Image: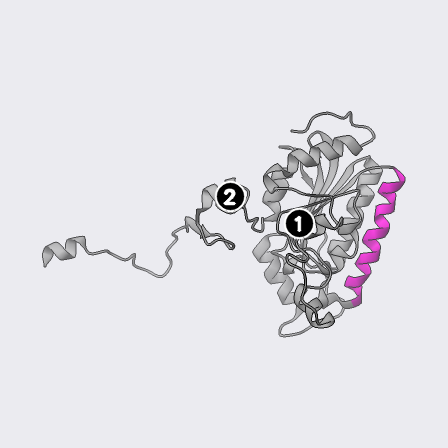
């Protein structure tokens, strides 16, 4: 009996156990993945290649040259409509801000990408589904204005469920604002590159995300305006296989290239060096 107690598994006592979870599961193939290696592989499953959603801060680190990123996104959202559904909008904003550590669903700033002076803006799906409200629209417009004023390229990584319903028409107005701001870049022949990740839908797809000089998309990303279920119910027809996925859109000419996240910076640098009027063309990183 004493020997049995000696080898019996002892459970940790206490409610607050600070034990890190070392493993995660692939959403696509179900493979068990060691978290450290999973992150080092840029959140791409080494078994099946599925691209999982990536934190905005880590995505900036993979694209911007080391030590060059200077954050400029500091605007904080307001609640001009006093919106309340199951809880006040202000409470939702506070919860998202505490969870993500940023004021709204975008992280951006100036940097170099392969030596090319750039403005890099990354949408954060973890903040209200990456929805575009007044702050996101204004930060994108300011980013385009800064790029034009300083002779920089503009790179936007999109990840969004669309417009932010709690801001109603104010959110929809951001579509026009962001599109108009791109005119400043085009007038100076400065490059704008869009990277579409999973998901990129709604008003983001219907505005700035689809108007770049070059549009990259990650493998398997859901890209469209309305979701497949809504379209199927509206037209009452079965949709083609892979409808609204990046590979389908590439085949039909709506994106320029489907690129593995682990190769994205190299290809992005090649495009920026080729298009930027003041940077000598050279090989990528």
Which residue in the structure is indicated by mark 2?
A: 39
Left or right of residue 188, residue 171 in this image: left
148 to 160, vertically: above or below: above
Instruction: Please report the residue visible at 32 percent of the width from the left and 60 percent of the height from the top.
Output: 14
Residue 74 visible in image: no
Percent of width and height locating residue 147: 80, 40
Percent of width and height locating residue 123: 67, 51
Instruction: Please report the residue visible at 59 percent of the width from the left and 54 percent of the height from the top.
Output: 100
Mark positioned earlier in the residue sequence (1 or 2): 2
Which residue in the structure is indicated by mark 1?
A: 247
Measured Cα–Cα span from mark 1 to mark 2: 24 Å
Q: Nearer the viewer, mark 1 or mark 2?
A: 1
Which image quadrant for residue 164? bottom right
Residue 277 visible in image: yes
Residue interval drawn in magenta: 169-188
Density class for disc 1 (Cα within 10 Å; few <14, some 14-19, many ≥20) is: many
Is 49 or 107 nearer to us in this picture? 49
Q: Is the magenta stretch mostly helix, strand or loop?
A: helix
């Amino acid at each position: 009996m004493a020997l049995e107690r000696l080898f019996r598994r002892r459970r940790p006592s206490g409610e607050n156990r600070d034990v890190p979870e070392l493993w995660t599961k692939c959403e696509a193939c179900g493979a068990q993945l060691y978290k450290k290696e999973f992150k080092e592989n840029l959140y791409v499953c080494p078994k099946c290649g599925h691209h999982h959603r990536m934190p905005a801060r880590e995505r900036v680190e993979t694209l911007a040259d080391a030590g060059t990123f200077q954050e400029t996104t500091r605007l904080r959202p307001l609640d001009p409509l006093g919106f309340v559904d199951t809880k006040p909008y202000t409470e939702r904003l506070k919860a998202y801000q505490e969870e993500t550590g940023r004021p709204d669903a975008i992280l951006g700033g100036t940097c170099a990408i392969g030596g090319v002076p750039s403005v890099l803006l990354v949408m954060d799906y973890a903040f209200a589904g990456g929805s575009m409200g007044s702050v996101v629209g204004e930060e994108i417009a300011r980013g385009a204005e800064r790029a034009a004023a300083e002779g920089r390229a503009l790179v936007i990584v999109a990840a969004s469920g669309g417009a932010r319903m709690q801001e109603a028409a104010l959110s929809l107005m951001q579509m026009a604002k962001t599109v108009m701001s791109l005119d400043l870049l085009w007038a100076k022949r400065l490059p704008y590159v869009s990277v579409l990740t999973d998901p990129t839908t709604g008003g983001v797809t219907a505005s700035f995300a689809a108007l770049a000089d070059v549009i990259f998309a990650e493998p398997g990303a859901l890209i469209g305006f309305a979701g497949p279920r809504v379209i199927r119910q509206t037209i009452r027809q079965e949709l083609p296989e892979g409808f609204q996925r990046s590979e389908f859109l590439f085949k039909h000419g709506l994106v320029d290239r489907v690129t593995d996240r682990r190769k994205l910076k190299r290809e992005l640098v090649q495009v920026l060096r080729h298009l930027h009027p003041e940077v000598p063309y050279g090989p990528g990183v």
